Image (spheres, rainbow, N blue to C red):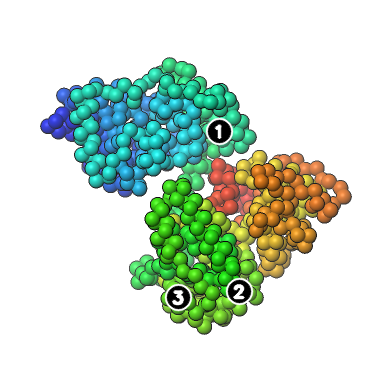
Amino acid sequence: MSLPVTYSVDRDGIGWIDFNDPTSRANVLDAAMLAALRLAVEDLGKQPVKVVVVLSAKEHIFIAGADLKWLGQLPDAAAAAQLAKEGQALFAQLADFKVPVLCAIDGACAGGGYELALACHWRIASDAQTTVIGLTEVSYGLIPAWGGGVRLPRLIGAQAAMKHILQAKLLPAAEALRTGLIDEVVPAASLKARAQVVALRLAAAGRPARTGSTAPHPLGSASPIPLQDVFSEFRKKAIAHGASQRAQLAALEVIEQGAALPFEQAMALEVEKFSEVATSEVAKNLIRVFFLKNAAKKTNLETWFPSEPEGSPAPAPARNIGIIGAGVMGTGLAHWCAMRGLGVLLHDADRATLKQSVEKIRELFHEAENDGLISHAAAHKAMGGIGLSSSLEDFEFCDLIIETITENEAMKQQLMAELGKFVPPECLIASNTSALAIEQITAGLPVPGRILGLHFFTPVSRMPLVEIALTAQTSRATAACALELVRAMGKTPVICRASPGLFVTRVLAGYLNEACRLWEQGVRSEVIDQAMRDWGWPMGPLRLIDEVGVDVLNSVFSELQKYFPARFAATRICDQLGKAGMYGRKNGNSSGFYTYGRENYSVNPLVGQFAPAQALEMKAAAIQNHLNNRMIEEAKCALAEGIVKTSAEADLALIVGIGFPAFRGGLMHYAKANGFLRDG
């Protein structure tokens, strides 16, 4: 059986270490990989090599980090400490090797993979789009454990290293070069040839004095703000977020304290801090979420169409997308589809709305250019691929049409009836609705098998989830085409049965409506929201209502009460705020439960006119349990009705769709772990 790491020495005296796990499409660092690397390093150390080059034999993948399944199964802190020590010792063999060691990176170089690169004496990366580099451990509730938290501050300075490690982002090669994470960027096609040239140069000149030093970085304290104050500010932010930021606090300690310690003592501190977080519930939950997201990439239709096995003729891919409605959702969809190379026809009966939409799309492309997501030439080409229309007759050449108009059943029914007169029978028709019944909206269309729901979340450019809603008549071919489109758009699919509220909106609405009920009983806005932020939500439920739109949520509450009267009683406050002209932050408004300035917000005193005379005191834990239990009960009902198939899909949908705190592992996972599920 082939080893995951092989090595050789060429006639120039260059030792080549190649990573290529034969059992996987990616290289990940696990026990077998580390053992094979140790063998390679030790054997090359006995040979008359002049220099060593570390690279991957896989195309567009260097090392994607440590095996998270392996890390997630660590039994205790002692096992975590032992793993960290062994990895550090192995990478120290590279750092202390008798000749210079060069790392040639093509593709993902993440986490432990970049820690290995840091132990090398020179780092070259290809300019391929797939080449991304960095330390991402804190996003999994972990910290670098194989020297990354010690070597990176000594390479680029403590403040820069702290920012990179806490952000846990993978950087494109050009940005990694600017940041100092690597030393060269070369065309992908010439990476190995350039590595050979540099290797021979290092063989003659010896190790670079700067890179690979174990001494503190000379610029470690060079900052207009004293480093102590910088660390203090980051620490305050991490502490404010509670248990979810335990890894960030541990990483800060390694960087801050390690900067003043001798190298070996700093490495020992890294081991200690890693062992404290590696087996925590937060780390296990975040690793679980990683695997939930991975599983979504393999979503298939087997459980939805068991009588139609895989192997049916594949549908033609949807390449020309019609979008009806140039509001916030339609505008965002048009931009995102064009960004992904799809043809777009954007329709709105109001030409002024279309004009505003075009200006907003230009802004979105400009932002994408500034963020390095698209070149100016590509943005210009994509913008040119967006057609505009004020007539439904123009949709005859579209493969798929998505309606995104106002959530009004009568308006949507009228639109669908008109649309049916013009579109060819082979065209797929999707509604973006989440609150309304898709079958009722589309009852007048002639080909029910080609109808489904595609529920996107705003802002489309940042929200990854798409609920693919299947009616009782939706064909497998239609579902397969929609699934392929969602993947082509780079989104995360969750398949669900078409039903009012689908899954995410239904569960979220139960939570938000219940928060309104607590408010109507006298619990203050800021108390409710602070309790849920303390629990881990990025914002409180009443603030979230302001962001989505008070009138939007009032409409959703009313619809769900109509469809689920025995379980969903709509509260009154959103209706009252809407009638008073307080719509939250929707469409530039500045008041709802809160009033908003340019950079801050405060409780809206005008809302007090609708509040009960007597305030109700309620402890944070009671608020958290009450609102969490309402979500859990609604999710249980949706699962029992088959709206989604599994608890894992339910968990992923809420994490990716509405920001349910990932460090809790998912709503149903949390419910099971904390005894909220009385019936299993």
Q: Quadrant of residue 190?
A: top left
Closer to the camera in the image, 110 or 601: 601
Q: CA distance from mark 1 to mark 2?
A: 48 Å
Say which residue label 2 marks. 412
Is residue 457 visible in the rendered image? The answer is yes
Badge 1 or badge 3: first in the primary sequence: 1
Closer to the camera in the image, 492 or 498: 492
Side of 87 where 161 appears, left or right: right
On-image quarter of the N terminus: top left
Residue at 40 percent across and 39 percent down: it is 175
Residue at 60 percent across and 74 percent down: it is 412
Say which residue label 3 marks. 427
Determine the secondary structure under disc 3: loop
Badge 1 or badge 2: first in the primary sequence: 1
Whether 351 is drawn above or below 246: the answer is: below
Q: CA distance from mark 1 to mark 3?
A: 51 Å
Is residue 675 visible in the rendered image? The answer is no
Amino acid at pointer 3:
Cys
Amino acid at pointer 2:
Lys
**Residue 67: where, in percent of width, then height?**
39, 40
Determine the secondary structure under disc 1: helix
Determine the secondary structure under disc 2: helix
Q: Tell me the number on the disc at residue 631.
A: none
